[in-house]
Image: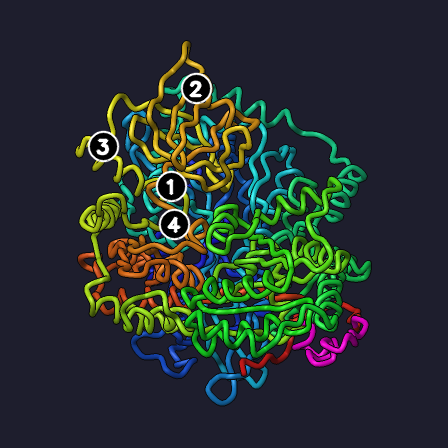
Amino acid sequence: MVATWNIAADAGYYARESEAQASYYVGGREPEGAWYAPAGDFGIDNGAQVEPDLFERLYAGLGADGTVLIAGNAKGRVPAYDFTFSAPRSATLAWAFVKPELKAKIEAAQLRAVRAALHLLEQEATFARRGHNGQTLESVPLTAALFQHGESRPAEHADGQVFADPNLHTHSVVLNLATRADGSIGALFSIAHRDLKLAVGAVYHAEFSAALIELGFEIDRVGRNGIFEIVGIDDALADYFSARRQEIEAELVKHGVSSAEAGALASSIARTTRQAKDEAAFEDRETIWKQAAARLGVDLTAIAEGLLRQERVHDAEQAEQLLAERLAELPAHLTEQRSVFERKDLIAAVATALVGTGLPASRISAEIDQLIEQAAVIEIGRNRLGHARYTTPEILAAERHLADAAIRLVAREAFHLDADRIAAQSKDAGLSAEQSGAALIATQASALAVIAGAPGSGKTTTLSTIVSAYRDAGHRVIGASSAWRVANSLSTELGIEARATASWLEGARHGHDFLQENDVLVVDEAGLIDLRDMNALLDHVEQAGAKIILVGDTKQLQPIGGPALSVVERSVEVARVEQIVRQHEPWSRDAIRDFGQGKAGAALDAFAGHGRLVEAAGLSATIGAAVDTWKRQRQPGEAPLLLARSNAAAMALSRSVREVLHEDGVLSGPDIAIPTVTPSGQTTSIALARGDQIRFLSRNDHLGVINGTTGRIAAVHQRGGEDPLDIEVEANVEGRTVNFLLSEIADSEGRARLAWAYASTIYQAQGTTVERAVVLVDGNFDRHQIYVAASRARQQTTLVFDARAIDRQLAGELPVGQTRKDGAFEPEVRRAWLAQRLSRTSTKESALEVQSAAGGEASKDKTREGKVEKQAEWRGREPARTREASLD
């Protein structure tokens, strides 16, 4: 239901299905197209019928008289873009099964919602390039041809029947040309349209739900980005009539993602796996749908009557109250995982809040104005299009609190160690010049130090010298990290007490202070500590009179919440350790550095040149190639680390590994299936047998395990009955035997917090060092993920990717209707596409950083001095049509 965005198909793809409108409701063709053209550009009347000849000429960049409208009209020009708006499954079925009068009203509601969404697109993101190299953007009118279609492509259903499901959707073909202020014609800046896709989809959902409520329908099951269903059509019926969607979702599951995670891949799968429409059956589609419902025993008359009986008086007061409650929660929701959000995020959130209230999408601007007027959200800067960027007062206050605390700790002259002695100890330990410099900075007279460095740069070696020096000086040193596994490594490698950050803070909340005066707290992987926890740590350090040493890298994986390390770094001299020493081979160290700098093309070339880049065709073959590599590199007592981006992909790798282990006799006895939960909270299941490697996903003091502890199954059996939580497990864990029932490690929903230990996600692996690693790479990796994944192993890292999946992604970027003859692209094209994906950065920004860059606050130097100026409040409505925006 989220709006999809693609390069448009050949003009005839849309127009040729507009014949025989008169017989539409009795099985005729799709209805005629209609123009969206509020500005009347090119002499088009808004709402007028699309005439195929004019449409095809404008599509080709020609005027009605054949005049060339736009320069550069050569081969390769993108003629248009297709925003497709698909009705919710239940609304589509209501449309398919109700009488013609109500059917027409639902179609009118669909058209109204599409026009509301396009109005947002026009007001917020429709620009044409101007000036030298097109570096200036000018707001221009939007012109689009709207074509309603009513079915999906044919697909096989659960009962074996093959037919096209009902699928009410509208292709909004946005012409890639517009009239500029001086009367000249220019092409659109399409990136702005693409980036606004989610907000456009949310506005569509808000307006469509409001229109349906006006017709008497009731809205429920509101989900991500405002996706909703209507009461009266249950999920089982919708599932049956969603065979095409299930085909696509099944393909996505194979790739370890959902449609919400990978909209582009979903779109490309939809296009590259579609069957041709059966024109002969086109006129009988409603008969086919009714026959299918009859086979299911569904009484369509009863359903239609049930939908019609929903006619009710809309309670305006209740709607306003519901909206107010949702808007009150909106700022906190927007900053759960980030500190800064864009105007498009705010639009999408407000639109989603409107869904189900019956209030129209035209309320969005007023509600945003009110949030700004009430200072529930604060504008802190502008993006390159001139659109506002926001944060909340709470986030800004938290960041200022953190910055101020950092300033005070830096200014506290304590914990100084003799520099000559540190230099001598560094030399004795064999530290490099960078590492020695970091040790000197970390032991200066200050209660706060930050060591930032590349993965594999020997930060632990550097810390050993620092910890030893402080211990020798009589200080107690303890450690912390966001993950128990990393904390345990700190404890083992540095010989200190170390715990997960959450454990230290939870104890403190219950009155158990973990810091005393003159203590030194070492925090590893500090880049993963979010704003709330970093504030708590620095508060405890300051109150206790202790010192904190933060060790991390903002270039690696980002925190789940708002960033904190970057805020602290604004207030302190950062000791940087950039020279990579972990990898044995110089080319590998260079390639990892290239990944971190966004030069993924050079890095991939290096891996390919050394035989470490493996290409396979299809997901099964790719997983097989990864596991074959794992099998070849396996040594007694040591197996390579298998890495994947998602939990689903890691599980797919683990299943393949278990097949190998069954064949080798490592696993024995029957497989016993158990319900489990992934670290991200998704329900799944795994099978356990004698010999299986397992990973605990939560701390259990009774068993003596933490999140990340691994073990090997010695025995597993069902004690009696069929209760999956009554399964008893005996496992060897770190040289000892533990016995437990699954109920002891289950969550409140009866899902065991347990996983196979054959493969890890990249997030789980940050901070891990191994000898060999095999990485399952996909197009959803970014710079941070590949930087971490490629740097885990000392001796050898192999990257494996699915060429067919990349071909599908590339095909999805072709105009709708265009395909490659064999569906395959050249290897160099694939690698270039993958390099572009792996070079993307998603570094989380702090509100202070954005505000400072915009000139809304004191400079970084003043921040270090503790001179934090008051937020300059920018009042007033953002202009609906910014005249110019610079891309410089």
Q: Amino acid at mark 1?
A: Glu
Q: Sequence-wise, which precedes: disc 3 or disc 4?
A: 4
Q: Which residue position holds label 2?
A: 724
Q: CA distance from mark 1 to mark 4?
A: 8 Å
Residue 629 in percent (x, y) is at 21, 51
Q: Which residue position holds label 1?
A: 249
Most extreme residue toward the top is: 721
Residue 12 in percent (x, y) is at 33, 59
- Say which of 873 and 788 sits in front: 788
| Residue drawn at (54%, 80%) of the image | 887
Q: Sequence-wise, which precedes: disc 4 or disc 2?
A: 4
Disc nearest the viewer among 3 and 2: 3
Q: CA distance from mark 3 to mark 2?
A: 24 Å
Q: CA distance from mark 4 to mark 2?
A: 35 Å
Q: CA distance from mark 3 to mark 4?
A: 38 Å
Which region shows up in magenta?
850-871
Q: Amino acid at mark 4?
A: Ala
Residue 461 in percent (x, y) is at 45, 64
Which SS class for mark 3? Answer: loop
Q: Amino acid at mark 2?
A: Pro
Q: Amino acid at mark 3?
A: Val
- Say which of 182 and 394 sits in front: 394
Q: Which residue position holds label 3?
A: 666
